[in-house]
Amino acid sequence: MKITIKDIAREMNTAYSTVSRALNNKPGISEAKRQEILLKAKEMGYEPNLVARQLRSGGSKTIGLIVPRINRVFFSNVIHGVETEAKAKGYSVIICQSNETEEEETDCIRTLLTNNVAGILMSHSKKTEKPGIHDEILERKMPFVMFDRIFPEMLINKVFNDNFNGAYALTKHLIDQGYSKIVHFAGPLTTNIYRERKEGYKKAMLDNNLPIFPGSIAEHVITKESGYTATEKLLESKQSFDAIFAASDFSALGAMLKLQESGVDIPGQVGVAGYANEPFTELLHLTSVDQHSTEIGRSAARLLFEEINENGAKHMKKEVVIKTELIIRESTNKKMSHEI
Amino acid sequence: MKITIKDIAREMNTAYSTVSRALNNKPGISEAKRQEILLKAKEMGYEPNLVARQLRSGGSKTIGLIVPRINRVFFSNVIHGVETEAKAKGYSVIICQSNETEEEETDCIRTLLTNNVAGILMSHSKKTEKPGIHDEILERKMPFVMFDRIFPEMLINKVFNDNFNGAYALTKHLIDQGYSKIVHFAGPLTTNIYRERKEGYKKAMLDNNLPIFPGSIAEHVITKESGYTATEKLLESKQSFDAIFAASDFSALGAMLKLQESGVDIPGQVGVAGYANEPFTELLHLTSVDQHSTEIGRSAARLLFEEINENGAKHMKKEVVIKTELIIRESTNKKMSHEI
DNA sequence: CAAAATTACGCAAACGTTTGCTTCCCAAGA
DNA sequence: TCTTGGGAAGCAAACGTTTGCGTAATTTTG
C-alpha cells in the first residue's frame, strides 16, 4: 500500500492541509512543525502522487517531443540535448515519432495534447508542408517550439540551423579551393532546410560570378542511392562539373561511391562535400557541415521552458539560429590533392 | 475551457455515471442512450482527461524506458522498436538516460516510479554491477523487463542477444578463413555482454585447438582510442597475431587505423572484426555482427505488455534470445585477399 | 492591558473521473 | 393481481492532492 498525505496527517494528529504545506515549502506553517512532518514523511517513506497533484493543480511535469525518426544521428542528438535540459529542470520527456508522415504526426500531436503535456517540441515530417492540426496547439495556448524543420510562416518560437550561411560557407570553400563548376544535390524543396541550403549555394555562386546551369541543381537527392544515380546521370550527360555539394551526407556518400567506381579522382578531378557531419563522414574524409545538433535540442528545450514559465503571458516569440561549423576534410582538398 | 463529462451530463439532463458508462462501452446503459450521448460528446468536442481517469482507476498508459545513452545507434534503434510497439498498443514512452552512471540510473528509476508508469524497460549502465534500487521495482510489483545489459541473477523477463554464439560464430569464421593467432579486445567484464562475447571467443578457440595466451585478451578496450593504443602495444610486443576480434566496432576501428598507419595489410597480414554492425562498418568493409537492435526493442516491449496485461498474476518469467547475424566483409577475407 | 495585527492550523471543497450501491420501472411468471 | 427479476439510470463516494477561507492562538503595538 502506497502511503499518502492522509496517513501522515493521521499519524501526526493534524490536517492534510498542514502536511501538504510542510511538504511543499508553502507559507502558513511554523518551521518546527514543518521539520517534524518532513521527518515523519521520510520515516514513513512517503512519495507524492504526481497524478493527484496534477489533477488538482493542472500542469504536468512532462514535455512532448515529436521527431520524424528517432534512430537518425541528428535527431538522436537533439533528443539527447532535450532530455539533458529537461532533467535539469525536473521534467520528463515523452517522445513520439512521425515516421516522416503527416498522418502519424497528427496522431503524435493528439496523443501529446490528451496527455496534458506542459509543452511540445517538434520538427515536422518531410511530408508535412504546412500547419494543420498544429494550429490547435496554439489555440490551446500550449507552449510550442519548432526546431530544424519549421513552418516559417508560423508565429512561434523556433530553433534552427543557419542553413543558408552553412551552405554559403561550404560553397565558398569549394570556390576558394579552385572548383568552379559546382553542382548541387538538393533535397525536397518543400522543406525549409533544403530550400535554404540551395539558396546559400546559389548566392555563393552568384557572388563569385559563377554560372548556374539548368542541370546544376538536382532535387530530391538525399539518399545514398539517389546520390549514386544522380552522379551516374551527371557523368553520362555532357555537363562538365568539378565539384558536388550535396545537401545530405548520404547522397554525398552515394556520389563518392559512383565516382570511385568510375575511376574519377577525389578531390583531384571532382571535389565532394555533404551536409550534417554524420559520423561516417569523418571516416571517409568527407567535407561536411556540423549542425551542433545537441545544442539545437538544448536551445529548443530552454526556449520551451521559458514559454512554460511565462505562463501564458504574451511574450515576444524568438528565433534562435544555431551557427554551423564547416568541417573541412580531404574530399575537397584540391590544392594539395592526394587521392583518398 | 475544456469540457468535461459533467458538462455533457448537464446538457443531456442525466448523471455523470451514465455519460461515463456510455463513453467507455460499459454495460448498464441502453444502446439508444449510448448513441445519443456519444453523438453529443463528439458534438461538444469532448476529450477525456487522462489524469483524472488515471487517478481514479490507477494504471497509466505510459511506459518508461531507461537507456545508458540515447544517441548511440544501438540504443536509438531499440528505442525505435519500443516506440513502434507501444504506439500500436496505445501507450506513450517516457525516455530517460543514465549517461552510463549508477547515480543517474537510480534517478531515472525514481522518476519513473513516481511518475506511475505502467512498466519499465531498461538496459543498465556500465557502472552498475548489481541490482540496487532495481529491487524496488519488483517490490512494487511493477512490470519490469531488462534488455541487452541485464542482471543475469535477477528473476525477471529479459531480452538479449546471443552474444556467446555471435562471438563464437565470428571467431569460427576467422579460423575458417585461415587465421589462427587471434587476439580479443574485450570490454569491461563486469558487463554481461562483454563477458559472454569473451566466452564465445574462448570456446571457439578451444574447440579448434587454438591456444589462448595471457596476452591474447585485452580488457576495457571498446573505444576507438583504446583500440588504437591496444593495437600499438600488440605491435610493439613480441606477441605474434594474425587477427583481432574486437568486442566493439569502435575499438576495431581504432585497430584498423593503427594497422593501416603501420603499413600492415588488412586482411592479408591481419584480419580485423568488430561487433554491433555500426553503420560505419559497412563503409569500411569491416566484418561485424548485427544485433537486430530494433527487434530487441520490439521484443522487450512485447514482453512488457504481456506482463502488464497479466496484471500481477504470477507467471513464468521468460528470456528471449535474439539471434545475431554474422556480417562478413573484406576486413577478414584472407582467402582471396585484396587489400582494403 | 486591551486592541490590533499577524501567524498557525483546521475544515472542506475542488480537480474529472469511475464505480458500488440504490432506486425506479417494466415485463414475466405464478 | 401480486410477486419476482432484471435492466436502466441516478446518487454519492472515492482516488490523493492543493487551496481559499475561517478561526484559534500568538505576537505586536499603543
Image (tube, coloured by chain):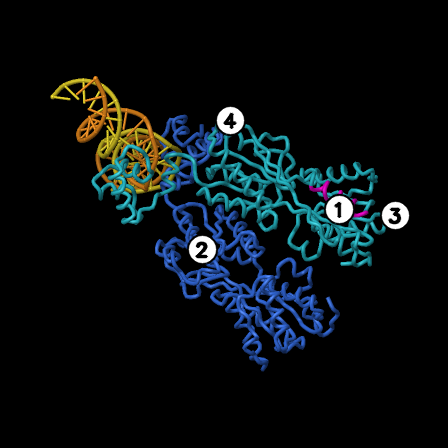
Chain colours: A cyan, B blue, C yellow, D orange
Q: CA distance from mark 1 to mark 4?
A: 42 Å
Chain under label 1?
A: A
Examine the image and state in which quarter residue A190 appears.
top right
In the rendered image, which residue does mark 2 sit on?
B306
Percent x, y of residue B23: 43, 37
Percent x, y of residue A292: 61, 45
Secondary structure type for disc 1: strand
In the rendered image, which residue does mark 1 sit on?
A245
Picture residue at 37% right of the left edge, 45% below the top = B58
Chain under label 2?
A: B
Percent x, y of residue B125: 48, 58
Q: Count neighbours of disc 1 (C-alpha within 10 A) and say few if under 14, some if 14 to 19, many if 20 or more.
A: many
What type is the residue that disc 4 sits on?
Answer: Lys
- Direction bottom: furthest residue: B209
User: Of callouts 4 and 3, which one flags the residue occurring earlier in the amino acid sequence?
Assistant: 3
User: Of callouts 1 and 4, which one flags the residue occurring earlier in the amino acid sequence?
Assistant: 1
In this view, the mark in front (1 or 2): 1
In the rendered image, which residue does mark 4 sit on?
A314
In the rendered image, which residue does mark 3 sit on?
A238
Q: CA distance from mark 4 to mark 3?
A: 58 Å
Picture residue at 58% right of the left edge, 42% below the top = A296
Q: Are marks 1 and 3 in contact (CB under 8 Å)?
A: no
Q: Count neighbours of disc 4 (C-alpha within 10 A) and say few if under 14, some if 14 to 19, many if 20 or more.
A: few
Picture residue at 41% right of the left edge, 31% below the top = B4
- Tell me if residue A168 is in the magenta stretch: yes
In this view, the mark in front (1 or 3): 1
* Magenta stretch bounds: A166-178
Q: CA distance from mark 1 to mark 2?
A: 50 Å
Do the residues marked 1 and 2 share a common chain? no
A296 on left or right of B268:
left
Percent x, y of residue A256: 76, 54
Chain under label 4?
A: A
